[in-house]
Amino acid sequence: MVYPQPKVLTPCRKDVLVVPLGWLPLSGRAHSTSTSSTSSSGSRTPPLG
């Protein structure tokens, strides 16, 4: 599904919170020794817009 970025800030906040929470374990497993800092910042940059 596409994130409702241009809609309202309320749904954006919910999506942003759900995305990192669900991606934290996935990213951690996929990118175990990868750049942790970059992973967090990178995954948060796209959803935020």
Image (cartoon, rainbow, N blue to C red):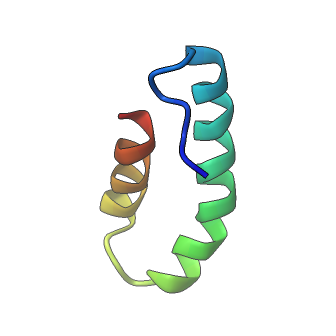
Q: Position of residue 16 (x, y in %)?
A: 58, 38
Q: Is residue 43 above or below residue 35?
A: above
Q: Position of residue 9 (x, y in %)?
A: 56, 16
Q: Is residue 12 above or below residue 45?
A: above
Could you tell me which residue is drawn at 35 percent across and 49 percent down?
41
Q: Is residue 48 above or below residue 40?
A: above
Quadrant of the rendered structure where residue 47 is? top left
Could you tell me which residue is drawn at 63 percent across and 38 percent down?
15
Could you tell me which residue is drawn at 50 percent across and 84 percent down?
30
Question: Considering depth in this image, is 22 or 28 the residue closer to the camera?
Answer: 22
Question: Considering depth in this image, is 24 or 10 the residue closer to the camera?
Answer: 10
Question: Considering depth in this image, is 49 or 37 the residue closer to the camera?
Answer: 49
Tell me the quarter of the image containing the C terminus: top left
Asked if residue 6 lies left or right of residue 19, the reply is left
Could you tell me which residue is drawn at 69 percent across and 46 percent down?
18
Quadrant of the rendered structure where residue 37 is? bottom left
